[in-house]
Image: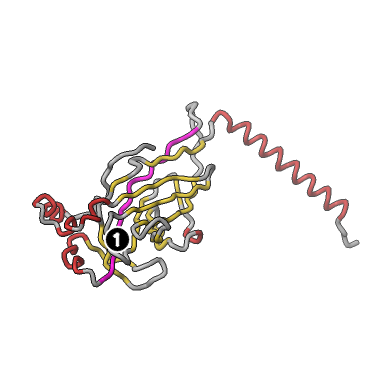
Amino acid sequence: MGPGGHRGGEGQSSSHRRGQRRGIDPLYSEPWLQSVSLNRRIVKDGFHRELVMDVELGEGAHQGCCIMIKAQLPQGLYVDPFELASLREHKAHTIVVYLKPGPKHSGHFTGTVPVHVRYHRPTDTEEATALVTLANPQLMIRCQESNPLMENWKLCVSEAPCSANSSSTCSWMNVNYRNVVETLTLQVPVGQKKDVPAVITATLLATILCCSLLLRAVWIHGEFEH
């Protein structure tokens, strides 16, 4: 992982980008939207990790805004939707997470997603770990519906559920952002094919031993009808 200035949010339309080049894009007439940043990090070790996401809006951001993250998980990770109340969707490897207002200031939003690492196939190489890379997510924002700029944001607005527990839909704006961490990766332990025979033998012996002890205990302490 390393710092960088990568821009995310590639979901804007070509007409929207042409408006940017002409310098008339109303989206960027709002200074606080020009300095949105996303900081992602992985915490904890082993096969059960947590993806922590922090979004910082620029100075002068509108009050009452909400943040939604739509992320594509790599094949090496998965989530349990029952572990996270803020998780709206879990379709294949796509998740939608609603961030909560953070403690720092009114423009700070944060969210934590429990992620689980899939077991990888044993490898022939000497590498003991494999790298799993998380793609840049979409960052969407929704402010008060009375905001007059919503009429000018139609080129990059889509309809989505208002919250994780809501059945109604709201207008969300897909915005560009700066990645504090340009590439987010984590290392996953990988087994060695040369160790497969030893693992199978040890597992089989342990199973036989446990079954033998269980049968002995039943034979000694069990009550049988005559």
Does residue 131 belong to the magenta stretch?
Answer: yes
**Segment tinted magenta in the rendering:** 129-145
Q: Residue at x 23, y 52 (%)?
A: 34
Q: Quadrant of residue 70?
A: bottom left
Q: Main secondary structure of the magenta part?
A: strand
Using a 10 Å C-alpha cutoff, classify the residue at mark 1 as few (fewer than 14 neighbours), some (14 to 19) or many (20 or more): some
Does 225 sit left or right of 129 as displayed?
A: right
Secondary structure state at the residue bearing disc 1: strand
Q: Residue at x 24, y 55 (%)?
A: 33
Q: Residue furthest top?
A: 126
Picture coordinates of residue 61, whole percent (x, y): 28, 60
Picture coordinates of residue 189, whole percent (x, y): 51, 37
Indicate the colouring scheme: secondary structure
- Residue type beneath disc 1: Ile
Q: Looking at the figure, which quarter contains the C terminus?
A: bottom right
Picture coordinates of residue 48, whole percent (x, y): 52, 47
Q: Which residue is mark 1?
A: 141
Q: Residue at x 70, y 43 (%)?
A: 207
